[in-house]
Amino acid sequence: MTDSPSDTLSTHFDEPGTIPKPGPVGRAVRLGWGILLVAAVWNAVRYHFVFLDSDIPYWTTWIGIAIALMVTPYVVNIGWGRNWRSVPRLVVMLGIGAGVIASRLFLGAWWSEALGWAVLVWYVYTLGHLGISFLLAAVLATPGCEMRAIPHLWTTVTGRPTREHICPGHIARVDSWERARHAS
């Protein structure tokens, strides 16, 4: 088992029980991120017109889109147990790019309602899956990456073990720090 996060988007799954469960600090960090992301999804749904307006969305919307684009490979690869590296991000970028080109060619605008709907659905799925996973990981004390929280719930309910994955982000550092603090 490795305590440091992966440098790449490759997916290495560990056998069940090899990654320690997070402590209270790690669980609190996961809870905080879960609340923040679920709130972002709630606001995206509540204010969906920001995505659907025929003008290019507000710059603040682009910050959320950039974050969702950044985490897309992790949500897909780790959450679904795949190893597609950056392909999910590339697919989303090509889809958005094709939508922008189609909007410009057929409607004369850089943004369209159809493109807005497509981006909104992807945004809600990506950040929603991540947010719910963070909340579940906090409640269940999921070992390693929060994106394995839904499979961990499956293990809890069925008794069938699922693979674990070290967190590729900052939370692995929090967990390592917390374990080292309690070991000394």
Image (spheres, rainbow, N blue to C red):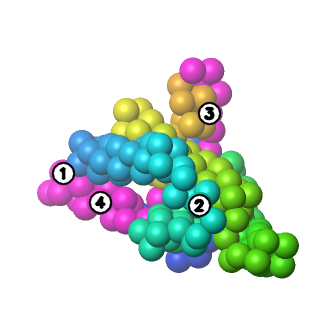
Q: Of the residues under marks 2 and 3, which one precedes in the sequence? A: 2
Q: Name the residue under label 4.
A: 174
Q: In front: 19, or 78?
A: 78
Q: Are marks 3 and 1 in contact (CB under 8 Å)?
A: no
Measure the alpha-carbon separation of dots 4 and 2: 40 Å
Q: Are marks 2 and 3 in contact (CB under 8 Å)?
A: no
The image shows residue 56, relative to residue 115, as above or below, that is below
Label 1 or label 4, whichever lies nearer to me, is 4
Q: Residue 53 carries which label?
A: 2
Farthest residue, direction left: 184
**Image side of residue 24 versus residue 13, left or right:** left
Q: Can residue 69 be seen in this view?
A: yes
Dot 2 amino acid type: Asp
Q: Residue 98 carries which label?
A: none
The image shows residue 174, relative to residue 21, as above or below, that is below
Q: What stretch is highlighted in magenta?
A: 157-184
- Please rate how many residues cluster around mark 1, counting C-alpha atoms within 10 Å: few if below 14, some from 14 to 19, many from 20: few
Q: Which mark is residue 161?
A: 3
> What's the residue at 35%, 44% (across, down)?
35
Q: In front: 126, or 23?
A: 126
- Please rate how many residues cluster around mark 3, counting C-alpha atoms within 10 Å: few if below 14, some from 14 to 19, many from 20: some
Q: Position of residue 15 (x, y in %)?
A: 60, 47
The image shows residue 140, relative to residue 114, as above or below, that is above
